[in-house]
């Protein structure tokens, strides 16, 4: 199958890597199966690459950075290429969405939304490429001090499987906008959309070697990329455990990295909340992507005076959820893999809290697919395993609290700090609590589930460090050189 294989009208390069503008098999010739979570069936193959393939990809990215046409393109021309890619993605949004759904299992509506957001990243960073630049610093008489903003060079991007296409927009787009070249290592569990996006980038005119993709196993390809001495910066999105390894590798090579890791994000519902507005958002913040969202609202903290009311409402809503095979009507599809399904089922079986509600797996769901019905537990002990650990599946913990101080203490009482929300009409409380929460994003009377493209996003502590999205990502993907000129 060493060719472009037609799938849903798309010619997907498989099982191939993209290196120096060429589609090439892994040096070893090894391949890996691609399985659809919808029915557990194999439908494609990807290259099972190793350190030799990374060696070639980094050399290609280095050559493109230092020598190729990329090195002399103006920021405006780079921006134009990003904008062209955004337009191409929008033209192909529907088949790309269908491919993403088959590969990842997410409901088709979610995949469509993901493609719109992916295009928006390339639009946003295309427009920003020539507007984020250096400065002159006033200094002593007779001096000109210029602060140049320069690309790092070769950026290694390692991504997870939960939003495979969207995350390319989040990290690759700002890296390219600032003039870096990229070696992307997508997740072995969902990487077909990434291969297609790289193919579209070539089609719209990105020079060879600027955007390379190498597929394969994390502990082989991801490890080789993170440890490679030719990589100047690393952008990692994934689990805290692997993030730690990536950060150690970066430190050994004295290069910087951003870590976008997990979360156990709380939503604080106070007794004065507009429950009609809050309830559908509380449900969606967990159900979206079957709970496999780093910013999933997986803990709902409810003031005791309205606890019973909220529990009744959650019960009704969650019991109405039918999990199914990702077609138009479904709001929750399967999990990514049998491994993830077993992991989530283990958390559910070992949970030490009463079950408030359980959704159902619909009859259309294939027995071989990786489906898990959503479960709501409560009241949960804030210190218990299900209330502390990131499950990355459709499991919601409901936790009562008495007052604001207790709510904040529970909210801040995990190792994570990615996103939080508070539901209250009290303006002073909105400000106090938003300030007291330890995390990277706070939503007041809404929940962004990772927020918009323009909004800086990232964590504290076990949720990682560095910020992506918005203009601040351009800071991460560039560095400053100060040039002091004494002219007289
Ligand atoms: P993971 O850490 O297992 O894998 C992420 C990527 O790292 C994959 O491409 C994998 O192949 C690679 N990898 C694995 N071992 C490696 C190694 N030794 N060296 C280098 N790379 C290696 O994570 P996952 O299971 O794909 O994704 C789930 C996790 O990602 C969750 O914890 C989730 O919260 C997190 N996540 C965070 C964000 C965010 O923005 N904060 C977004 C999405 C997912």
Image (cartoon, rainbow, N blue to C red):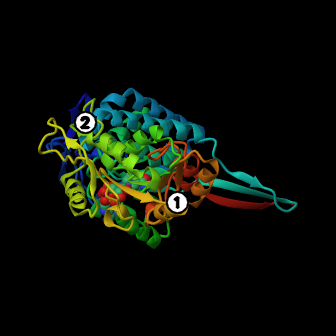
Q: Is residue 118 visible?
A: yes
Comparing 185 with 77, the one in front is 185
> In the picture, which quadrant includes the C terminus?
bottom right
Give residue 182's mark.
Answer: none
Front residue of 288/58: it is: 288
**Counting other residues with Cα less than 10 Å from the Cα at mark 2, is it few (<14), some (14-19), or many (20 or more)?**
many
Q: Position of residue 267 (x, y in %)?
A: 46, 52
Q: Is there any visible trace of residue 60 in the rendered image?
A: no
| Frontmost residue, 242 versus 387 | 387
Mark 1 C-beta to ligand 1 under 8 Å: no
- Position of the N terminus by quadrant: top left
Task: Determine the secondary structure under disc 1.
Answer: loop
Which residue sits at x=26%, y=42%? 319
The yes-or-no answer for disc 2 within 8 Å of ligand 1 is no
* Of marks 1 and 2, the one in the foreground: 1
In the shown orientation, is residue 122 left or right of residue 160? right
According to the image, label 1 marks what residue?
403
| Disc 2 element | loop
- Residue at (68, 51) in percent of width and height: 134
Q: Locate residue 53, reporting x and y percent.
A: 30, 56
Residue assigned mark 2? 326
Of labels 1 and 2, earlier in sequence is 2
Residue 362 lies in what quarter of the image? top left
Q: Position of residue 264 (x, y in %)?
A: 40, 58
Residue 18 percent across, percent down from the top left: 33, 46
Q: Residue at position x 46%, y 59% from top?
A: 401
Q: Nearer the viewer, residue 107 or 465?
A: 107
Distance between the Cα atoms at labels 1 and 2?
A: 41 Å
Query: Where's ligand 1: which quadrant?
Result: bottom left
Residue with the most extreme bottom position: 252
């Amino acid at each position: 199958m060493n060719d472009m294989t037609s799938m849903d009208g798309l010619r997907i390069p498989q099982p191939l890597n993209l290196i120096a503008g060429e589609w090439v098999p892994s040096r070893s010739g090894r391949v890996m199966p691609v399985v659809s979570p919808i029915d557990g069936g194999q439908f494609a193959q990807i290259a099972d690459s190793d350190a030799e393939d990374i060696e070639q990809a980094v050399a290609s990215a280095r050559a493109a950075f230092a020598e190729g046409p990329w090195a002399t393109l103006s920021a405006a021309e780079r921006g134009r290429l990003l904008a062209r890619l955004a337009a191409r993605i929008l033209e192909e949004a529907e088949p790309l969405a269908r491919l993403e759904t088959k590969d990842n299992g997410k409901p088709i509506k979610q995949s469509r939304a993901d493609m719109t957001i992916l295009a928006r990243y390339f639009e946003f960073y295309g427009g920003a490429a020539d507007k984020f630049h250096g400065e002159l610093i006033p200094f002593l008489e007779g001096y000109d001090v210029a602060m140049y903003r320069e690309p790092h060079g070769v950026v290694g991007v390692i991504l997870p499987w939960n939003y495979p296409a969207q995350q390319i927009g989040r990290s690759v787009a700002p890296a390219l906008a600032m003039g870096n070249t990229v070696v992307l290592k997508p997740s072995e569990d969902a990487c077909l959309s990434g291969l297609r996006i790289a193919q579209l980038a070539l089609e719209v005119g990105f020079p060879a070697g600027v955007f390379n993709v190498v597929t394969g196993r994390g502990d082989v390809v991801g490890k080789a990329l993170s440890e490679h001495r030719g990589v100047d910066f690393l952008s990692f999105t994934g689990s805290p455990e692997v993030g730690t390894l990536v950060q150690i590798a970066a430190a050994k090579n004295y290069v910087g990295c951003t870590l976008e890791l997990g979360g156990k994000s709380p939503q604080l519902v106070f007794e004065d909340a507009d429950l009609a507005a809050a309830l559908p958002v509380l449900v969606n913040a967990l159900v979206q992507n079957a709970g496999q969202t780093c910013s999933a609202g997986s803990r709902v903290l409810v003031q005791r005076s309205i606890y019973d009311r909220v529990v009744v409402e959650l019960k009704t809503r969650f019991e109405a959820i039918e999990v199914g095979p990702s077609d138009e009507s479904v709001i929750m599809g399967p999990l990514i893999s049998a491994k993830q399904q077993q992991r989530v089922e283990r958390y559910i079986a070992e949970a030490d809290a009463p079950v408030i509600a359980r959704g159902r797996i619909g009859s259309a769901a294939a027995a071989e697919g990786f489906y898990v019905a959503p479960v709501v537990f409560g009241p949960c002990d804030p210190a218990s395993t299900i209330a502390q650990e990131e499950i990355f599946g459709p499991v919601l913990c409901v936790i009562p609290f008495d007052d604001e101080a207790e709510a904040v203490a529970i909210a801040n009482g995990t190792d994570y700090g990615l996103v939080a929300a508070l539901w209250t009409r009290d303006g002073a409380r909105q400000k106090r609590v938003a300030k007291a929460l330890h995390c990277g994003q706070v939503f007041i009377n809404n929940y962004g589930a990772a927020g918009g493209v323009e909004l800086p996003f990232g964590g504290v502590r076990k949720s990682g460090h560095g910020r992506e999205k918005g203009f601040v990502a351009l800071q991460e993907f560039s560095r400053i050189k100060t040039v002091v000129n004494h002219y007289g």
